[in-house]
Amino acid sequence: MMKIGDVIKQLREEYNLSQTELAKRLNVGRSTIAMWENNDRVPSEDKKEEIADFFNIDMNYLYGKTDIKNSYIEQISQSFMCSIEEQEHIKKYRSLDTHGKELVDMVLNKEYHRPKEFVQLMPPIIVPYYGEVASAGTGQFVFDDIPPEMIEIENCMENMHVNFAIGVNGDSMEPTYSDGDTLLVKKQDSINIGEIGIFMIDGEAFVKELGNGVLISHNKDYEDKKINENTICLGKVIGKHIKGCLHRYMGGES
Protein backbone atom coordinates (compact mmCIF):
# COMPACT_ATOMS: atom_id res chain seq x y z
CA MET A 1 0.00 0.00 0.00
CA MET A 2 1.33 3.43 -0.94
CA LYS A 3 2.06 5.93 1.78
CA ILE A 4 0.56 9.43 1.80
CA GLY A 5 3.85 10.98 0.76
CA ASP A 6 4.10 8.67 -2.25
CA VAL A 7 0.56 9.58 -3.30
CA ILE A 8 1.26 13.32 -2.98
CA LYS A 9 4.39 13.00 -5.15
CA GLN A 10 2.53 10.95 -7.75
CA LEU A 11 -0.31 13.48 -7.94
CA ARG A 12 2.07 16.42 -8.16
CA GLU A 13 3.95 14.85 -11.05
CA GLU A 14 0.72 13.93 -12.85
CA TYR A 15 -0.29 17.59 -12.74
CA ASN A 16 3.19 18.70 -13.85
CA LEU A 17 3.73 20.79 -10.74
CA SER A 18 7.06 21.44 -9.09
CA GLN A 19 7.38 21.20 -5.34
CA THR A 20 7.56 25.00 -5.20
CA GLU A 21 4.35 25.39 -7.24
CA LEU A 22 2.45 22.89 -5.11
CA ALA A 23 3.73 24.57 -1.95
CA LYS A 24 2.31 27.89 -3.13
CA ARG A 25 -1.06 26.29 -3.92
CA LEU A 26 -1.24 24.71 -0.43
CA ASN A 27 0.25 27.70 1.36
CA VAL A 28 3.18 25.79 2.84
CA GLY A 29 6.95 25.86 2.36
CA ARG A 30 8.70 23.85 -0.35
CA SER A 31 10.63 21.98 2.32
CA THR A 32 7.32 20.83 3.79
CA ILE A 33 6.33 19.30 0.47
CA ALA A 34 9.73 17.58 0.27
CA MET A 35 9.32 16.11 3.77
CA TRP A 36 5.80 14.89 2.93
CA GLU A 37 6.99 13.21 -0.24
CA ASN A 38 9.94 11.61 1.58
CA ASN A 39 7.48 10.40 4.21
CA ASP A 40 9.51 12.22 6.85
CA ARG A 41 6.41 14.11 7.94
CA VAL A 42 2.67 13.52 7.57
CA PRO A 43 0.31 16.39 6.69
CA SER A 44 -2.12 17.55 9.36
CA GLU A 45 -5.75 16.49 9.04
CA ASP A 46 -6.67 19.94 7.71
CA LYS A 47 -3.91 19.77 5.11
CA LYS A 48 -4.96 16.27 4.09
CA GLU A 49 -8.44 17.58 3.33
CA GLU A 50 -6.95 20.54 1.50
CA ILE A 51 -4.76 18.22 -0.58
CA ALA A 52 -7.74 15.98 -1.37
CA ASP A 53 -9.83 19.01 -2.40
CA PHE A 54 -6.99 20.47 -4.47
CA PHE A 55 -6.45 17.27 -6.46
CA ASN A 56 -10.16 16.41 -6.37
CA ILE A 57 -9.60 12.95 -4.89
CA ASP A 58 -11.18 10.77 -2.23
CA MET A 59 -9.45 10.62 1.14
CA ASN A 60 -9.18 6.84 0.73
CA TYR A 61 -7.03 7.40 -2.37
CA LEU A 62 -4.79 9.79 -0.44
CA TYR A 63 -4.36 7.15 2.27
CA GLY A 64 -3.46 4.59 -0.39
CA LYS A 65 -6.46 2.40 0.38
CA THR A 66 -7.97 2.45 -3.13
CA ASP A 67 -6.89 2.93 -6.75
CA ILE A 68 -10.00 4.99 -7.53
CA LYS A 69 -9.17 8.67 -7.24
CA ASN A 70 -12.74 9.83 -7.03
CA SER A 71 -15.68 7.43 -7.10
CA TYR A 72 -17.90 10.08 -8.75
CA ILE A 73 -15.43 11.55 -11.18
CA GLU A 74 -14.28 8.12 -12.35
CA GLN A 75 -17.79 7.66 -13.72
CA ILE A 76 -17.47 10.75 -15.88
CA SER A 77 -15.74 10.82 -19.25
CA GLN A 78 -12.07 11.72 -18.98
CA SER A 79 -12.69 14.53 -21.46
CA PHE A 80 -14.42 16.48 -18.68
CA MET A 81 -11.48 16.25 -16.27
CA CYS A 82 -9.98 19.65 -15.48
CA SER A 83 -6.35 20.61 -15.20
CA ILE A 84 -5.17 22.82 -12.35
CA GLU A 85 -5.25 25.87 -14.63
CA GLU A 86 -8.77 25.04 -15.78
CA GLN A 87 -9.92 24.70 -12.18
CA GLU A 88 -8.51 28.16 -11.47
CA HIS A 89 -10.40 29.58 -14.46
CA ILE A 90 -13.62 27.98 -13.23
CA LYS A 91 -13.16 29.50 -9.76
CA LYS A 92 -12.61 32.94 -11.28
CA TYR A 93 -15.61 32.52 -13.60
CA ARG A 94 -17.89 31.64 -10.70
CA SER A 95 -16.85 34.80 -8.88
CA LEU A 96 -17.96 37.06 -11.76
CA ASP A 97 -21.25 38.92 -11.88
CA THR A 98 -23.77 38.41 -14.69
CA HIS A 99 -22.16 41.03 -16.93
CA GLY A 100 -18.73 39.48 -16.50
CA LYS A 101 -19.97 35.99 -17.25
CA GLU A 102 -21.75 37.20 -20.39
CA LEU A 103 -18.55 38.88 -21.58
CA VAL A 104 -16.48 35.75 -20.96
CA ASP A 105 -19.13 33.60 -22.69
CA MET A 106 -19.06 35.87 -25.73
CA VAL A 107 -15.27 35.70 -26.09
CA LEU A 108 -15.20 31.95 -25.42
CA ASN A 109 -17.87 31.23 -28.04
CA LYS A 110 -16.13 33.44 -30.59
CA GLU A 111 -12.81 31.69 -30.06
CA TYR A 112 -14.42 28.25 -30.02
CA HIS A 113 -16.00 28.76 -33.43
CA ARG A 114 -13.11 30.71 -35.00
CA PRO A 115 -11.15 27.70 -36.40
CA LYS A 116 -14.25 26.62 -38.33
CA GLU A 117 -14.46 29.97 -40.07
CA PHE A 118 -10.99 29.82 -41.57
CA VAL A 119 -9.21 27.52 -43.95
CA GLN A 120 -7.10 24.95 -42.14
CA LEU A 121 -3.43 25.85 -42.04
CA MET A 122 -2.34 23.33 -44.64
CA PRO A 123 0.26 23.98 -47.34
CA PRO A 124 -1.53 25.30 -50.46
CA ILE A 125 -1.61 23.37 -53.70
CA ILE A 126 0.55 24.96 -56.40
CA VAL A 127 -0.65 24.67 -59.99
CA PRO A 128 0.25 26.33 -63.30
CA TYR A 129 -2.03 29.20 -64.32
CA TYR A 130 -2.35 30.02 -68.02
CA GLY A 131 -4.18 33.33 -67.86
CA GLU A 132 -7.26 34.23 -69.87
CA VAL A 133 -6.68 31.99 -72.87
CA ALA A 134 -9.72 29.68 -72.68
CA SER A 135 -12.30 31.41 -74.79
CA ALA A 136 -15.89 31.73 -73.78
CA GLY A 137 -16.45 33.69 -76.94
CA THR A 138 -14.81 33.48 -80.33
CA GLY A 139 -11.78 31.41 -79.37
CA GLN A 140 -8.16 31.95 -78.40
CA PHE A 141 -5.02 30.17 -79.46
CA VAL A 142 -4.21 27.13 -77.37
CA PHE A 143 -1.78 27.66 -74.53
CA ASP A 144 0.80 24.94 -75.14
CA ASP A 145 3.60 27.43 -75.76
CA ILE A 146 2.54 29.94 -73.09
CA PRO A 147 4.88 29.87 -70.07
CA PRO A 148 2.55 29.37 -67.08
CA GLU A 149 2.47 31.39 -63.91
CA MET A 150 2.41 29.32 -60.73
CA ILE A 151 -0.44 30.09 -58.32
CA GLU A 152 -1.59 28.73 -54.98
CA ILE A 153 -5.05 27.24 -54.53
CA GLU A 154 -6.80 26.01 -51.43
CA ASN A 155 -5.64 22.63 -50.15
CA CYS A 156 -8.95 20.79 -49.95
CA MET A 157 -10.36 17.48 -51.12
CA GLU A 158 -12.06 19.02 -54.17
CA ASN A 159 -8.77 20.47 -55.42
CA MET A 160 -6.64 17.35 -55.03
CA HIS A 161 -7.12 16.44 -58.71
CA VAL A 162 -6.56 19.93 -60.17
CA ASN A 163 -3.74 19.92 -62.71
CA PHE A 164 -3.88 23.51 -63.93
CA ALA A 165 -5.85 26.73 -63.77
CA ILE A 166 -6.98 28.78 -66.73
CA GLY A 167 -8.65 32.15 -67.17
CA VAL A 168 -11.91 32.75 -69.04
CA ASN A 169 -11.97 35.20 -71.91
CA GLY A 170 -15.46 36.21 -73.04
CA ASP A 171 -19.06 35.89 -71.89
CA SER A 172 -20.49 32.94 -73.82
CA MET A 173 -20.65 30.80 -70.64
CA GLU A 174 -22.51 33.34 -68.54
CA PRO A 175 -24.08 33.12 -66.05
CA THR A 176 -22.06 30.00 -65.12
CA TYR A 177 -18.66 31.52 -65.84
CA SER A 178 -17.81 35.13 -66.62
CA ASP A 179 -15.00 36.94 -68.35
CA GLY A 180 -11.92 36.91 -66.11
CA ASP A 181 -12.96 33.93 -63.97
CA THR A 182 -10.25 31.45 -63.04
CA LEU A 183 -11.20 27.83 -63.67
CA LEU A 184 -9.62 24.80 -62.01
CA VAL A 185 -9.12 21.94 -64.46
CA LYS A 186 -8.34 18.24 -64.21
CA LYS A 187 -6.49 16.90 -67.22
CA GLN A 188 -8.45 14.19 -69.04
CA ASP A 189 -9.14 13.44 -72.67
CA SER A 190 -12.90 12.96 -72.34
CA ILE A 191 -15.82 14.09 -70.18
CA ASN A 192 -19.46 13.10 -69.85
CA ILE A 193 -22.33 14.89 -71.58
CA GLY A 194 -23.51 17.71 -69.33
CA GLU A 195 -20.05 18.36 -67.87
CA ILE A 196 -18.00 21.45 -68.65
CA GLY A 197 -14.53 21.11 -70.10
CA ILE A 198 -11.70 22.84 -71.89
CA PHE A 199 -11.65 21.93 -75.57
CA MET A 200 -9.25 22.64 -78.40
CA ILE A 201 -10.66 23.11 -81.88
CA ASP A 202 -8.31 23.86 -84.75
CA GLY A 203 -5.66 25.27 -82.42
CA GLU A 204 -8.06 27.37 -80.32
CA ALA A 205 -9.13 26.71 -76.74
CA PHE A 206 -12.72 26.95 -75.54
CA VAL A 207 -14.58 26.39 -72.28
CA LYS A 208 -17.91 24.75 -73.09
CA GLU A 209 -20.46 22.23 -71.85
CA LEU A 210 -20.35 18.94 -73.70
CA GLY A 211 -23.58 18.17 -75.52
CA ASN A 212 -24.61 15.48 -77.99
CA GLY A 213 -22.30 16.23 -80.89
CA VAL A 214 -21.93 19.89 -79.91
CA LEU A 215 -20.19 22.15 -77.44
CA ILE A 216 -22.85 24.20 -75.66
CA SER A 217 -22.66 27.88 -74.75
CA HIS A 218 -24.69 28.85 -71.67
CA ASN A 219 -25.21 32.36 -73.01
CA LYS A 220 -27.94 31.96 -75.62
CA ASP A 221 -26.56 34.90 -77.59
CA TYR A 222 -23.89 32.49 -78.80
CA GLU A 223 -24.34 29.51 -81.07
CA ASP A 224 -23.18 26.06 -80.03
CA LYS A 225 -20.10 24.66 -81.74
CA LYS A 226 -20.21 21.38 -83.60
CA ILE A 227 -17.73 18.71 -82.59
CA ASN A 228 -15.50 17.50 -85.43
CA GLU A 229 -12.50 15.24 -85.86
CA ASN A 230 -10.21 18.07 -84.78
CA THR A 231 -11.96 18.61 -81.43
CA ILE A 232 -9.75 17.61 -78.49
CA CYS A 233 -10.75 17.57 -74.83
CA LEU A 234 -7.98 19.01 -72.64
CA GLY A 235 -9.67 18.53 -69.28
CA LYS A 236 -12.70 18.74 -67.06
CA VAL A 237 -13.55 21.96 -65.22
CA ILE A 238 -13.74 21.06 -61.53
CA GLY A 239 -14.77 24.46 -60.32
CA LYS A 240 -14.09 28.17 -60.17
CA HIS A 241 -11.32 29.61 -58.05
CA ILE A 242 -12.36 32.54 -55.89
CA LYS A 243 -10.33 35.49 -57.03
CA GLY A 244 -9.99 36.85 -53.52
CA CYS A 245 -8.10 33.66 -52.62
CA LEU A 246 -5.79 33.74 -55.63
CA HIS A 247 -2.14 33.96 -54.62
CA ARG A 248 0.74 34.08 -57.03
CA TYR A 249 3.44 31.65 -55.97
CA MET A 250 6.52 33.33 -54.49
CA GLY A 251 4.91 36.70 -55.17
CA GLY A 252 2.27 36.89 -52.44
CA GLU A 253 0.12 39.16 -54.64
CA SER A 254 -3.68 38.78 -54.49
Image (spheres, helix red, strand yellow):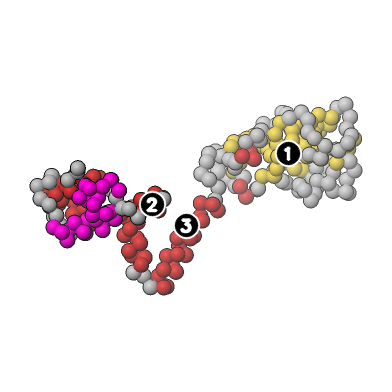
* 86 vs 135: above or below: below
- For the residues marked 3 and 2, what is the alpha-carbon distance in whole angstroms? 29 Å
Crowding around mark 3 (Cα neighbors within 10 Å: few <14, some 14 to 19, many 20+) is few
Q: Main secondary structure of the magenta part?
A: helix
Give the percent coordinates (x, y) of residue 159.
63, 39
Give the percent coordinates (x, y) of residue 120: 53, 45
Q: Nearer the viewer, mark 2 or mark 1?
A: 2
Given this view, does label 3 or label 2 mark the residue nearer the observer?
2
Instruction: Say which mark, if any, is on residue 237.
Output: 1
Q: Which residue is mark 3?
A: 111
Q: Is residue 66 rendered magenta in the image? A: yes
* Element at label 2: helix
- Res 31 seen here: no
**Mark in the foreground, 3 or 1:** 3
If you read the primary sequence from the N terminus, does the residue marked by circle 3 or circle 1 appear first? 3
Is label 3 in a helix, a strand or a loop?
A: helix
- Determine contact: label 3, label 1, CB under 8 Å: no
Mark 1 belongs to which amino acid? Val
| N-terminal-most mark, 3 or 2 | 2
**What residue is shown at x 72% (from left), y 46% (from top)?**
180
> Which portion, as a residue range, is magenta?
44-68
Label 2 CA crowd tier, 10 Å (few <14, some 14–19, many 20+): few
**x and y percentages locating residue 157 in the rendered image:** 61, 39
Give the residue at mark 2: 75
Residue found at x 52% / y 41%:
122
| Amino acid residing under circle 3 | Glu
Residue 122 visible in this rendered orientation of the protein: yes
Give the class, few, some or many, for how many residues have Cα within 10 Å of label 1's Cα (few <14, many ≥20).
Answer: many
- Looking at this rendering, what residue extends furthest in the left direction? 40
